[in-house]
Image (cartoon, helix red, strand yellow):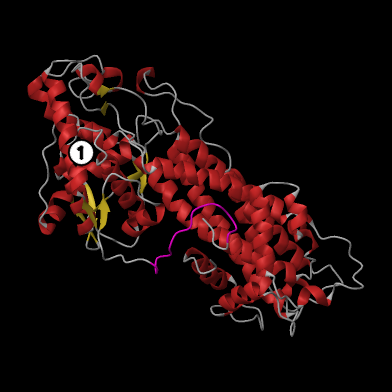
Amino acid sequence: MMTGDTSRMPTQPTSDDSDHGSPLPITGARIAPWELEQVAVFGRPVEIAAEARGRLERSNRTLLEAIGKGVALYGVNTGFGSLARQRVPADELADVQRNLLRSHAAGVGDPLPDQTVRAMMTLLACSLSRGHSGVRPVVVTTLAELLNAGITPIVPETGSVGASGDLAPLAHACLTLIGEGRVRFRAETMDAAEAMKQAGIEPIELGPKEGLALINGTHLMAARAALTFTGIRRLVDAALCATAMSIDAVRATDSFLDDRVHAIRQQPGQQSVAARLRDLLRNSQIIPSHREDDPRVQDPYSFRCSPQVLGAAIDQLEHSARVIERELESVTDNPLIFERTDDNDAARTVVSAGNFHGMPLALTMDTVAVALCHIAGMAERRVFFMLAASDPQNPINPHLSRHPGVESGYMITQYTAAACCNEMITLATPASVSNISTCAGMEDYNSFGPRSTAKAERSLDLCRKVVAIELLCAAEALEYQRPLKSGDGVERAFNLVRSVVPRLQRDRSPASDIRVIEELIAGGRFG
């Protein structure tokens, strides 16, 4: 997820690097997080590839043949959840699917962001296109038409327990397919039927299993997780730039970056962080300026142990990225449709299982929130150390104030960073370890992955603010080291900060300064 060979996590282009006008083909192959971002955030159109249409047709044909054999198929000719023993007459198969969407649209709370809903719809289309859900091609092509037209369902945030799929959010989203519910379209909120009429899109009549296939997957969890990881890659790049800048801003040593130290620890994240920091500090004039006659023996942990702590966080994030990538090429529906075997056994072509369970994502995103805590925590400690200005070897003013006592400088930015870290600590409490059963006990162990992903998304936002504060303070502290220059990479990051934030000449509100640096981080400018 980072550039500069600082990690094995996959890199991705920023929003400026890709052609958003060319349609993204939905083939059934894995969609990359950055491709999902292009569709969900930047409006790249999608198109259903011919091979995906072929799989959809074959899957639907297999399902209809299995129905014709009269075998009880969960959610197809039976009720749902604890009502699974109730058989549904053939002439009511379409009614039960339509009623499923209506009854399960029971979410509450503020609407999800449009980009989250669009990402969820995109992943749903990708999953269905893999041909194991039994839906007709028209279901997926209509999803694509809604995305391309910019019709975004209004989906309340809260309602999914992360097992049996993200039922409530997906039900709210997929009501739009049948012309029901409320949507945002052309900057207005309106009925789905009206938006579809204006866009020239025909609502569909659901066939057997199609309502269940639309809501019985992990697509909200996966969408939110994938979009979060596009931001994490950019954050980590910025966090390493901030760390390197702070090292020179406080005249710390670089001896702890010696590659021999990290080679004998054998932790890959630690080695990659040390290598990246060495690269950022290459050609620094500040480091050799205090190498001789400096009475300090070693620096605080937030500097000296940055490869060990940040490396450990990055290793965990790398593992999490792999879990998300696998989810983006998965089918998480139930029941699943497989092409006929030689014995022509309908019971083996439609298989009830549990791929909808969100525990892989729930555990992953709970871990992400913990890892982000350590990135933010180290940054906050370095800000504290800079602003304390308690080291006589470093010629900086307390709180980086130009007139200490008369002006407070950046004193309160550390308070803000501390407040962000405190909230992140709360968000690091896992959602996945506390179970509440549902559906009369049939669904007796849920993942609560949607909460895990929501917490991780909020943690990313807070962590970005803390790193922005470190960049703000480190850039100011670097001014006190002039005319000496830092490393080439640090100077590039410094100039980027100075392109949006001038030096502190007198007290001013730092809020807007923090915000514009956050925007640089979110845009991947430190990569």
Residue that extends furthest to the left in the rendered view of this protein: 91
Q: Residue furthest front?
A: 342
Which contiguous range is marked in magenta? 5-17
**At 53% from the left edge and 66% from the top edge, which residue is drawn?**
527
Q: Which secondary structure lies at badge 1?
A: helix
Q: What residue is pinned by disc 1? A: 55
Residue at point 30% right, 65% down?
20
Which picture quadrant has residue 94?
top left
Reply above or below: 514 against 211: below
In the rendered image, residue 218 lying in the magenta stretch gets the answer no
Q: Within 10 Å of the Cα at label 1, are there few (<14), some (14-19), or many (20+) other Cα atoms?
A: many
Please state the horizontal and vertical placement of residue 66, each as a whole percent of the image.
16, 21
Q: Looking at the picture, which amino acid does disc 1 mark?
A: Arg
- Position of residue 385 measured from the top left corner of the image (x, y, whole percent): 76, 63
Q: Can I make out residue 74 in this image?
A: no
The kind of secondary structure the magenta stretch mainly shows is loop
Q: Position of residue 356 (x, y in %)?
A: 36, 31
- Of residues 366 and 18, the one nearer the viewer is 18
Horizontal side of 235 relative to 22 (left or right) equals right
Q: Give the residue displayed 63% in from the left and 55% down from the top.
A: 376
Nearest the viewer among 16 and 505 is 16
In front of the other: 282 or 500:
282
Q: Is residue 9 magenta?
A: yes
